[in-house]
Image (cartoon, rainbow, N blue to C red):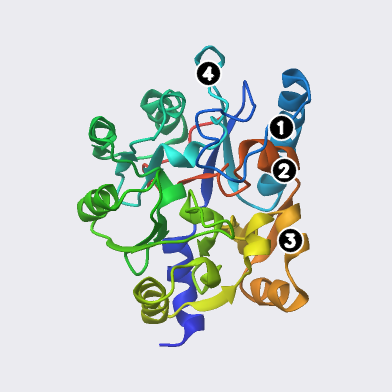
Amino acid sequence: MSAASREPVALATQCARTVLMVRPASFYANPETLPTNAFQHVVAAAPADTLAAAQAEFDRAAEALAAAGVEVVVARADAAADTPDALYPNNWFSTHADGRIVLYPMAVPSRRRERRPELIAALAARHGWRTGATLDFTGLEAQGEFVEGTGSLVFDHGARLAYAALSPRTHAAAVTTVCRALGYEPVPFRALDAAGREVYHTNVLMAVGPAVAVLASSMVAPGADLRRVFDALEASDKMLLDITPEQVAEFAGNALFLDGGRQGPLVAVSRRAWASLTRPQRALLEQHARPVVCGVETIEHVGGGGIRCMLAEVFLPRLPGPRPAG
């Protein structure tokens, strides 16, 4: 079967048509996550100014994705909870095409306050999403085991694989537990930055689309780990777009392939990320997806996560009948 004939099925399987974004009510470099996130930076600007800049970037990104054909559902963070990382909802839950919802164990208390399963239930009722069982792994926190959603797990849904860069926020035992419940094969590996620190989340150095995988292979531990990742990519027939550690520092690995409906497949990338790519790298991406470039520099610099982290994919099936209004 040719790649072209497989593409419509692969696109629907791998790429969400709908995303949830959570508009921040507070935003600053979270001191609880600073020790493990080398991408975060404390800034001297007034908190209100930093929040206003982040909200403006958030709004423009949501508008750009909606204009590109993505169904963008925007929720507001709980202002009373003081959750500076709430605009990264992909870490506390994931949704799946069979209706299942997964709740994940988070490493620090402030991020656990982001979890709002009642929000997902309310949005499902409003938008006609059909939900099934909820797989709640938050009890692993008591055992000191963490796996932070699609930050920790980069899914290849067609091949039923879950890539996981092991770190203080992504533990091997938790990865295995979640993958076993979902029926995915874990692909664990170690990844280090130039300072020898473990990369905190897989999705800052890796993204998987229907046909292309973005990966900073030089950051993956050589030997068995790198062979494991390359073997999985080859077995799943993915073309590799290899990026450098310097490009990872510009969030080039923090991209997300999405379904733009009639406008076709797209890839959400940040302005910093896109600027860091070479002309051949851009051309390779553009062969398979239309880039939607979002300026989220404040969010990247202060929060330590980029545009991919801001997007929680909604794979839940639709209930029959007309969609609810609003």
Q: How crowded is mark 2: few (under 14 residues within 10 Å), some or many (20 or more)?
A: many
User: On the image, which quarter does residue 155 sit in?
Assistant: bottom left
Check whether the beta carbons of the residues at disc 2 and disc 4 lie within 8 A of each other.
no
In the rendered image, which residue does mark 2 sit on? 296
Marks 2 and 1, Cα distance to the nearest angstrom?
7 Å
Residue 2 higher or lower than 114, as above or below: below
Location of residue 229 in the rendering, given as x and y in whole percent from the top left corner: 40, 72
Marks 2 and 4, Cα distance to the nearest angstrom?
21 Å
Location of residue 73 in the rendering, given as x and y in whole percent from the top left corner: 56, 36
Disc 4 residue type (three-letter)? Asp
From this viewpoint, which residue is outermost toward the top? 80
Marks 2 and 3, Cα distance to the nearest angstrom?
12 Å
The residue at the point 47 percent across, 81 percent down is 5
Disc 2 residue type (three-letter)? Val
Pointer 4 or 3: first along the chain: 4
In the rendered image, which residue does mark 1 sit on? 54
Disc 3 residue type (three-letter)? Trp
In the rendered image, which residue does mark 4 sit on? 78
